[in-house]
Image (cartoon, helix red, strand yellow):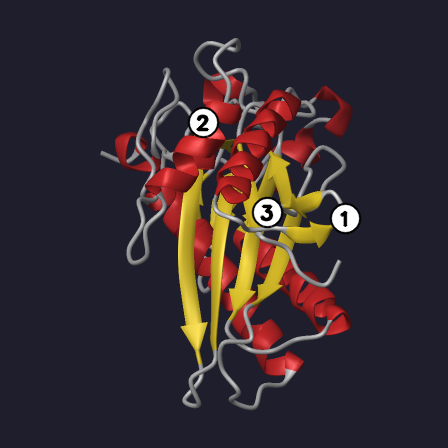
């Protein structure tokens, strides 16, 4: 496939994939899809995060939710934090959910003087803590009893990783998109470099219990000259900023406090 028609980011673990059916129905009704002998087939890709331990585990995104999300889509500023795929996201889970902090969804963009833009939308639901990429200061991590945050690395140095209670319930998923024109190989490289932003803002990143994934998209809306080195660097920076916004914009939910509530 050289072209897709929608990307879905959802919670609900594998149950949340049901929302893609609603997205496909929305697109089919509007004549959007890949032309086949049997009719149009919308190409929808997606990823889900595990958030069933927040609130009721039997309330999950379904096809109706996917359809409603398409109906609600608007250009311009979007809500961030504890909304959409970020609603049940949590971070800093090395000491279990009882010491975790609320994650969320965040967005940011970077651009060049020539009009190239790279944007990132990231749902942050990681085992490790979120840090300030510039200073390394922990913004949201495992809570200590004094109202601050602990270092996941320090926790790992004191106990074996097999003793961590974070489990296989983590993932940071997102999209990086540019108005430049890219081929398949360049789009792949853009996604690879976007993960550098994840590694700079989440510590540790890419662990065996984190299902980290980025989709990369290119609209080709501008003919301005672009090189993949610049685009990848911009994508990584946008991802960093989006991850920080995901936790700073989040609000507490179902007993899991936001970083603002922890640091009052």
Camera-nearest residue between 189 and 91: 189
Q: Residue 129: image x %, image y %? A: 52, 41
Label 2 SS:
helix
Q: Is residue 93 above or below residue 178?
A: above
Quarter of the view holding residue 186: bottom right
Q: Residue at x 68, y 34 (%)?
A: 156
Q: Which residue is mark 1?
A: 37
Q: Is residue 180 left or right of residue 119?
A: right
Q: Earlier in the sequence, mark 2 or mark 1?
A: 1
Q: Which residue is mark 2?
A: 65
Label 1 SS:
loop
Label 3 SS:
strand
**Mark sitting on residue 208:** none
Q: Residue at x 58, y 53 (%)?
A: 5
Q: Is residue 154 visible?
A: no
Q: Residue 229: image x %, image y %? A: 65, 81
């Amino acid at each position: 496939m050289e072209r897709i028609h929608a990307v879905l980011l959802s919670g609900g673990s594998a149950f949340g994939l049901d929302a893609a059916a609603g997205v496909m129905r929305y697109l089919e009704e509007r004549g959007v899809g890949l032309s086949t002998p049997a009719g149009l087939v919308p190409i929808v890709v997606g990823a889900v995060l595990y958030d069933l331990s927040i609130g009721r585990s039997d309330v999950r995104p379904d096809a109706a939710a996917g359809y409603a999300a398409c109906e609600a889509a608007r250009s311009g500023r979007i809500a961030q934090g504890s909304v959409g795929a970020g609603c049940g996201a949590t971070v800093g889970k090395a000491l279990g959910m009882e010491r975790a902090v609320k994650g969320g969804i965040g967005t940011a963009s970077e651009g060049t003087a020539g009009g190239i833009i790279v944007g990132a939308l990231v749902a942050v639901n990681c085992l490790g803590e979120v840090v300030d990429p510039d200073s390394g200061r922990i913004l949201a991590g495992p809570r200590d009893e004094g109202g601050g945050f602990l270092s996941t690395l320090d926790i790992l140095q004191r106990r074996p990783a097999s003793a961590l209670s974070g489990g296989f319930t983590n993932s940071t998923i997102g999209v990086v998109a540019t108005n430049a024109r890219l081929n398949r190989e360049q789009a792949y490289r853009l996604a690879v470099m976007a993960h550098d932003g994840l590694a700079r803002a989440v510590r540790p990143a890419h662990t065996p219990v984190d299902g980290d994934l980025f989709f990369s998209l290119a609209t080709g809306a501008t003919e301005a000259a672009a090189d993949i080195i610049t685009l990848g660097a911009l994508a990584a920076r946008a991802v960093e900023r989006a991850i920080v916004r995901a936790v700073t914009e989040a609000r507490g939910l179902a007993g899991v406090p936001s970083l603002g509530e922890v640091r009052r």
